Every structure is written in structure tokens, then in C-alpha cells.
Image (spheres, rainbow, N blue to C red):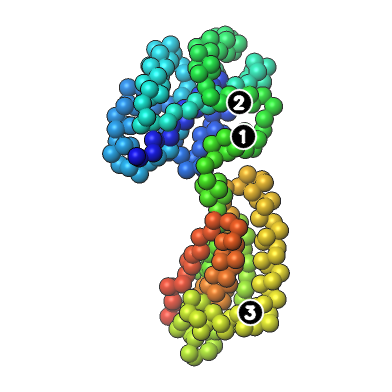
Amino acid sequence: MKEPLKLVVVTGMSGAGKTVAVQSFEDLGYFCIDNMPPSLLPKFWELVRESGKINKVALVIDLRSRAFYDEIIELIRNLGSNNVIDTKILFLDASDEELVARYKETRRSHPLAMEGRLMDGINLERDLLKDMRMKAQFVVDTSKLTPRQLREEIFRNFETSAETAFHIEVMSFGFKYGVPIDADIVMDVRFLPNPYYIDDLKKKTGLDKAVYDYVMNSDKTEEFYTHFITLLQTIIPGYKDEGKTSLTIAIGCTGGQHRSVALAKRIGEALKKDYPVRISHRDIERRKETVNRS
């Protein structure tokens, strides 16, 4: 039997952290929708089922009127009555004092008090949302939470796969084509012996055994690799603790075809023992008609 689609309804008080929440669900691989009119949702679910490509959806609801609220309550009741969609409600709350402070800081108007007192809007929203709060499986008070702490709370409750939460990209590149702008860690290996100057290896790449062995059968390479892999194994847990969902490690040589490719392959394979890793070689097929070193 096909597993039901996972739906998380993200709702709660305006200013309580729905923006941070939706960004967190995106990082967990959810397809996120912000304030879709309730009348369009049945058609959306029909398209999702037909596509078969989406299995996790986070629906962000900002209740701005009684009519909208009633439609959503009815929709959730219908969704919860079948086995096709597994529906959970995440309700974000905060104290009145904290909500007032956040609105004052951002100088935004409350959606239910555009021309009135801020507290009038907060009180009205609490009244509208009291039934939804009672139905929620997860209620998070963000009064004393930082955005990072809220993110960690969402990951704790909704993370289903370590691969979804954190993964590593190990890539090779050539400095003469530019440093990858999305790299978190960049390592230059142009100090290692260069296979480009060996006629039999010049037109091969670091994925070829002959080139790989040439690069690795060097005392310099072995010393570098030992120190670098130890460093990575020491610092990667810190990146995870800081809430990063991905880490890009870029290994560069001159042309991105020999030394960096071989090292990226070895480093990536070693890290795969503990983390989900993807190995890529940005410039392995780029060969300019030039006398520059590889």
C-alpha cells in the first residue's frame, strides 16, 4: 500500500515565527505553500497525487478572517478523515509581551489591526485560533527561542532522515576557472606533484587509476590527506551543531582535472562512512587550448 502524503499545517500567532518555520521545512525537503486560498487546495492535492513526485508538504496558514478560518478548519477535518494524507498541525505561539515587542521592533502592522491598536489584533487572533491550537499535535512557544532554536525544535519533531537534515558536497575545481562561490571550505592542492607533466597522464583525469595512483603515491599527498581528513572529522560536527543543513568542501588544483579530482574522490569516500556525501567534479571536462598547467 502506498504511503500517505505527509502534510504539516504551520499556523499560529502572527509574529510567532512562521517565516523561520517554513524555511526550516524547506530544508527538510518539504514542498512549502504560503497562504494558498482554501478553495484551491483540493485541486492542488489532486495534482500532487497525480504527479507522484511530492510526498511532503508544509502548508503555512495565516488566519486573517473568520471566513478563511472556517474554510481551513473544514478542510483539515476532511483531510484527517482519510488515509491518503497524514496531517499534522504545528502551532507557533508567543506571549503577548513578546509579540508586541517584535511588532514594535519591525514596525509592522498586525494583519488584524491594520488601523487599530496592536493588542486588539493580537486578542482577536487568539480568539480565532483557540480551536486550532487545541487541535494541534505540536505547540511551540517561541517567546524565548532564537530563530536557530526554533529551527532545531522543528528538526527534532519533523526530521525523518539524517540525509534530509545534513549532507556534504565534496567537489573538485580548477582555480583558473574561478573559486566556487558557494563553497564553505576551500582547499588548495596545487602544491602536490602534478600529473600534467607526465605525457601518459596529461590527457587523463583523477578518476583514472593511473592518475589517482600517481597523486596518492606521494609522501606529500599522504601527509596532507592525513591532516586534512582529521581536521574535517573534527569540525564537521560543529557545522551540524550550528544548524547547517549542507556543507560544501571544494578541493582545487590549477585546471580541476587531476590532483583535485583524485583528492576529492578520496576525501568524499572517507566521509561517506559517517555522512551522506555527494562527490562532483566541476571542471573535469573543461580543457582550454592553452599551455597553462593542469
The numbered disc on residue 192 is 3
Judging from the image, what secondary structure is the residue with disc 1 in?
helix
Residue 254 spot, x, y in % from top left: 55, 75
Check disc 3: other Cα within 10 Å, few if <14, some if 14-19, many if 20+: some
The numbered disc on residue 140 is 2
What is the distance, in whole Å, between disc 2 and disc 1 at their CAs?
8 Å
Contact? badges 2 and 1 (CB < 8 Å): yes
Residue 292 spot, x, y in % from top left: 52, 81
Check disc 2: other Cα within 10 Å, few if <14, some if 14-19, many if 20+: some
Out of 167 and 82, give the one closest to the viewer. Answer: 82
Of marks 3 and 1, which one's residue comes earlier in the chain?
1
Residue beneath the point at 43% across and 73% down:
286
Vertical arrangement, residue 240 with respect to residue 267, above or below: above
The numbered disc on residue 153 is 1
Residue beneath the point at 61% across and 34% down:
153
Q: Of the residues tagged 2 and 3, which is closer to the observer?
A: 2
What is the distance, in whole Å, between disc 3 and disc 1 at their CAs?
45 Å
Judging from the image, what secondary structure is the residue with disc 2 in?
strand
Please tell me in which quadrant of the rendered image residue 109 appears: top right
Residue 251 spot, x, y in % from top left: 58, 67
Query: Is residue 218 toward the left or the right of residue 202 in the image?
Result: right
